[in-house]
Image (cartoon, rainbow, N blue to C red):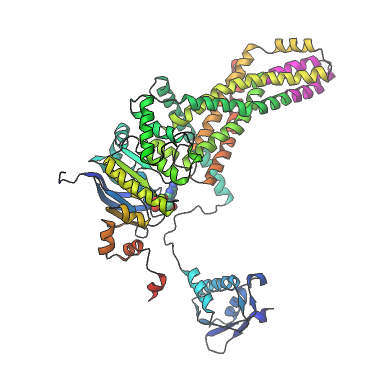
Amino acid sequence: MDSVIATVIEVRDLDLGYDDYAVMRNLSFSVNKGDIFIVMGVNGCGKSTLLKSLIGLRAPTRGKVLYSGKSFWDEDEAGQQNIMRRFGVLYQGGALWSSLTVGENVALPLQLYTKLSCQQIQEVVALKLSLVGLEGYGDFFPSGISGGMRKRASLARAIALDPDIIFFDEPSSGLDPINARKLDDLILELRDGLGATVVVVTHELASIFAVGNNSVFLDVESKTMIATGDPKSLLANSKDPRVIQFLTRGPDSKELKR
Amino acid sequence: MLSEKLTFDYSIPKTLLIKLSGDWQISAGLLSVNEVTSQLTTHPDIAQINFSVSQGLKWDSGLIAFLLKLIRECGQKNIHVAREGLPQEAQKLLALALKVDEKDIPPKDARESFLERSGEKALQISESLAAGLDFLGDIAVSLGRLITGKSYFRWDDFMLIVQRCGVDTLLLVSLISLLVGMILAFVGSIQLKMFGAQIFISDIVGIAMVRVLSAVMTGIIMSGRIGASFAAELGMMQTNEEIDALKTLGVSPVEFLVIPRVLALVIMMPVLTIYADLMGILGGFVISAGMLHLNPVEYLNHTQHAVKLSYVWVGLIHSLVFGVIVAVSGCLRGIKCERSAAGVGIATTSAVVTGITGIVIATALITFICQILGV
Ligand SMILES: Nc1ncnc2c1ncn2[C@@H]1O[C@H](COP(=O)(O)OP(=O)(O)O)[C@@H](O)[C@H]1O
Ligand SMILES: [Mg+2]
């Protein structure tokens, strides 16, 4: 492999907010090709808001998001669409289209953006479903399968067009430890298999250490990022008590008193 | 009563010692903090409060609530409240209750006065009018793309919605237009009987139903059943991020979700309106022939003469406009739904309110225009 590390996403001086309410300020970090990049922080610190501005759903109040050098929010609509075509997104609740079957959900992106015939689309759908372990569930409606299966079906839809970058919003929320672990494994396998770059929003410590090789830590009080780097080395080397507290589930309140 | 629970001791200078005893459980009722604050006003030199507890003290959250309030009030008066004399567990609970976790609370809508809220509502109406026009623009653009074959149209969805518009409302439309026809016949007969001109009931029923009433009634039913269900469906999709998932795929939610719904309703409204015309005339006929003893054949002939073709067109124009109003307000409210279960409820009600208000305003406008044109 070449030794030059390609930057896939670069975030520069990003401010996020809703109307007058500032959520985060001065975010700058970059995500390299093949990374599994973790966005971590406590509930309500602005992880989903950051994700929305990365996937083109909500403009930041200031700053730039660069995809392979192109500033997403400065592109025109066609340019933005071209960049978005490279994304796959797994939403927090799955967000499968409830009026379509699981198979139709996976098929829709293919119908829209490829010239494959119906027969070929069915084959690709079957492949994607079997990648996430849902072979044979194509004819089920989202309401008829379990939460863990919905997450995986939604992952199948996210990878329908072989995206370059896959975004996950709290993939393990609502899953039991076994299924959460399975999904983590799936993330790793798909990254390797598809050669994709992965951005995961999560506050699940087990996932953070299992999959992440780079991260940014959003702090709710100072409203900005206070650490970035490999989560394992952050745990080992960080001097910031807020980061350590988060990565160790916080010291016991009794220890704190001593 | 009071002396059982609280005793005040001033033996140490500048310090109030409160002795707690008796039953301080919630079931025994909460004591007002005023008992203590009144003591403080009569002794303004007090700078510290200490506690002591008697053997038989029984307490639960009732005591904690009392103490919490006391601590907050004393905090304002700069009086130190020493908690050491309290039971261990009570001290822990108080510490927990007094710990501040959230430092920066996001702005929240404060309760506003009646006037403020009325003003706010007026602003909202003008905002939602602007949003509505914006949305209509989006729909027009999407329709253009559909006609030129540039967009993606799901026939299956469209057919399902068309069927739902028909099946879900047919019974209601039948019942209501039949009854409206009957009511018109009754009300008309009261006046016309005085002139022996009861046969003109057929004119009243026929013209009123065909020109406006069928369309208005069908529109209101559609708003309640179909408009509301559009808002609920799209609102749920918004809440579940399904609409975000469409956007990131580069699919316009208007093309994918709104256009099939608007088209389905615009097609079904006129069909149902014609059907409602017939049911209304039938209602009038049943009353006139059955109860007012008019000649059935003469009644039908009269109806045929009274109802001109232009009136049918006027009715159909009403129904087309209502179809657009109901579908657009349902879809707009759904797509702009706030992301919560409560948001879906609000979207649904406001879709119906917007739909019905729109129908009445549009009726007034169309009637006025017809008056000018002399139709
Ligand atoms: N649609 C919205 N309008 C206004 N404020 C919002 C909205 N969504 C989220 N927020 C606020 O933004 C902050 C960050 O939310 P979010 O990004 O969802 O947090 P996280 O995903 O990290 O739990 C929260 O304080 C929340 O109250
Ligand atoms: Mg979130």
Which residue lies at the image location 41% right of the left edge and 47% below the top edge?
Answer: A19
Question: Which residue is rendered at x = 37% and y = 60% of the image?
Answer: A221
Residue A182 x, y percent position in the rendering: 38, 49
Q: Residue reaching furthest bottom? A: B11
Q: In the rendered image, which quarter is residue B303 located in?
A: top right
Q: Quadrant of the C terminus of chain A?
A: bottom left
User: Does residue B185 sit above or below A20 in this rendering?
Assistant: above
Residue B321 in view: yes
Range covered by the magenta-colored residues: B181-209
Which quadrant of the rendered structure holds the N terminus of chain A?
top left
Seen from the viewer's position, the closer of residues B72 and B58 is: B58
In the image as oriented, which residue stretches furthest toward the front?
A136
**Nearer to me, A243 or B360:** A243
Q: From the image, give the main secondary structure of the stretch colored magenta.
A: helix
Residue positioned 56% across, 39% down in the render? B348
Q: Find out whether residue B347 is within the magenta segment.
A: no
Q: Would residue B26 appear left or right of A123 to someone viewing this image?
A: right
Image coordinates of residue A252 in percent, x first then y, are 40, 69
Q: Is residue B195 rendered magenta in the image? A: yes
- Across and down, in percent, residue B192 comes to 81, 19
